[in-house]
Amino acid sequence: MDAARIRKIVDAALAEGRDALTELEGLAILEAMGVPTARRHFVRDSAEAAKKPLLPGPRAVVKVISPEILHKTEVGGVAIVANESAAIADAVRGMEAKFAGQKVEGYTINEFVPFEPRLGHEIIVGYRFAPDFGPVVSFGPGGVYTEFLATVFKPGAANAFWSPAVAGRADVERGLRDNAVRTLLCGGLRGTRAALDEKRLVDVAAAFVEASALFPALGILEFEVNPFAVAKDETGEGRLVALDALVKIGRLEGGELARVGDRIVNAAQAARPLGKIDRILEPRSAAVIGVSEKGMNNGRIILRNLIENGFDRKRLYVVKPGLDELDGCRCVADVASLPEKVDLFVLVIPAAQAAGTIAELAEGDKAESVIVIPGGLEEKQGTEAIVARMKAALTKARAAGGGPLLNGGNCLGIRSVPGRYNTLFIPEHKLPMPKGEVAPIAVISQSGAFAICRVSKHPLVNPKYIITCGNQMDLTVGDYLERLAEDRELQIFAVYVEGFKPLDGEKTLRAVKRIVDSGRSVIFYRAGRTAAGAAASASHTASIAGDWPVTRALMAQAGAVVVETLDDFDDALSTFALLRGKKATGRRLGALSNAGFECVAFADNLGALELAPFSPATAPRLGKVFADSRISEIVDVHNPVDLTPMAPDAAYDDTFRAILDDPNVDCALAGIVPLTGAMNTLAAGEGHAEDVTREDSVAGRYGRIMAETDKPWIAVVDSGSLYDPLADELGKRGVPTFRTADRALRMLNLWLSARLGG
């Protein structure tokens, strides 16, 4: 790529005050990128046109070149004529008359490229600078099929997207693997010949990805070729030819954005003292303002939470005039009276007062970080002056190397196990915090309610960090992911996003790729996908909703496990948490159930899995289990194994062990339809002798299997609420358990794809 040539073209146009390039300049940039274009001559007028040598072919295309005429076809700026000097000169002469008085630089005489205007033979490749993700490259069908296929095809089938932050040529190849255009052109349908060598398609898309990394700093905001046509070269081989190019330009520097070297960055974010983020994650000292002396308000709940989590009361202060002590913590009259610069200041006062307090903290250098609980600081009418003071104080303090980092506002704050604190101001009787072994999980959510709902629904998962960052007035999702990627104890990152601050989507992509490349997992859910959803999320995001198909594609490209529903988010969190340490070696599935319908459901929902053929040693082992359980006359050896309702707990245990021990089985699924009287599947109660908590129950047996094997497997309990205790007991013993087969297999596929790729 000839970056110097591209820079020269754009700089000259910007110097003229233009916001777009001519088609001729756009084609020149394509050539500098190494992308093929149609052959052409440039002429100043009709007299010069009459003297130019003719290009090959029976016809020629004449186009006007003007910075004032970007959409030429609509105004008569394109003519297809006989490839004869007189006809070409006449076409130029007609345009000279039509566009008299407009700024016309000249005309191009272009090779007429014959192509079949059918599905797949016209392609759009483009680039745009997105406020959240920065440079994004898109690929898809052109011509009349563009909008139609984008709406009716499944995601990724018609359109593909790449970010140079995380994508290279190999990613382009993967992104095109299942693309409908690539299949039509290069894969060749049955009975047809491929129209184009796949390498040529990848070359063009990869050239755009490479160049797009530099485009923002060069001043290129959008660049679209519509279409690339699939034509034949002199040898009869397929070639891609750019027939048109639309390029919009402008300087991105200014406001929040700045140019640093060859990159555009968020200047406001770059000025923050992000090295202090550890102070908010693991503070050694803290203060709270907004604590009630008599009632149990949010501030008092937070203070109690810090104390109950083991925070050192000697370095925990309450800003409250008129008291010396509250709950064993020293009280001070105001911010200025704090006896030390605290690592963490928790602000639980109304928004109208919050901005002034933040300004005091910055001006007096009294805190390294602040959790801002209330929302509306920057949006509330009547607070403009105090907000301006707050921003000025932060800017001045940061310029001098100080100033606090802010988390929030409009958030519930943070629960940090290593930091020994919890600002999620929900009473313990309403939301018991998970206890026991700390899971190597970080939950990062813009919505505090979303985070606490996950805690409530996953009482057995005790995340190391739960971070709610609200409207991201300062610290962002990308900031936390970037920092926590360095924490190698963390294995799973569960992320909920409603919108990105400028370029924080790009930062998030880089962090996700770094995490995934290190063998860890990111579970990602994007809300605010529609106009209505974006409006509903505005209080949290204070940023644009973004484009969901682009977000989905780019996050998946970075390696995130992108889930479509809230149920899938919860299921994925359980699956990834409980299958930690299991080895993914393949997709050959071994399965059993005691219901025929469920065995059929397994086969119908395999996804990328395949049913494993049992090895020769497994059949006699299963045969003995069936004989010992007196079910051999009704049960055959095949996969899935249908044990029928006659099988007792021991048979369930021995059969599943045999399946997992089979060398042909990479992963497994146990379906438990628990209504049979032959199994211990009920909670202890009157009228029966069952108790799912006993070690000889199917839950006890399967818990031991999970602890003893390194193969990944999951369970299904497809029954009503009477069997919730069975599902819960399996979960307590480390078994990912779902209530339907399709849901279970979707999660097993998701986990394996994250581990194996594809």
Image (spheres, rainbow, N blue to C red):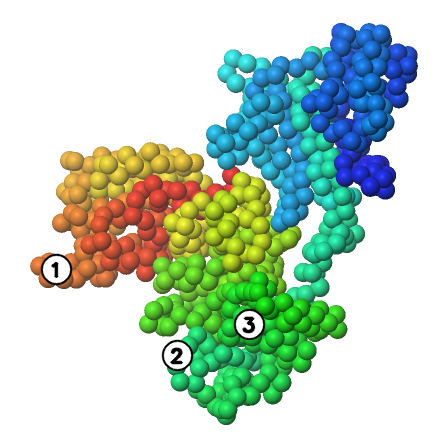
Label 2, residues with CA under 10 Å away: few <14, some 14-19, many ≥20? few
Q: How far apart are marks 1 and 3 (CA)?
A: 62 Å
Label 1, residues with CA under 10 Å away: few <14, some 14-19, many ≥20? few
Q: Distance between the residues labelled 2 and 1?
A: 46 Å
Q: Is residue 270 above or below residue 568?
A: below
Amino acid under disc 2: Met
Say which label, 1 or 3, has the lower sequence index: 3
Q: Which of 373 and 731 is in front in this view?
A: 373
For the point 28% across and 59% down, the residue is 729
Amino acid under disc 1: Ala
Q: Tell me if I can see residue 710 in this picture.
A: no
Residue carrying label 1: 689
For the point 71% across and 64% down, the residue is 271
Find residue 551 and report its image quarter.
top right
Find residue 356 and report its image quarter.
bottom right
Residue carrying label 2: 296
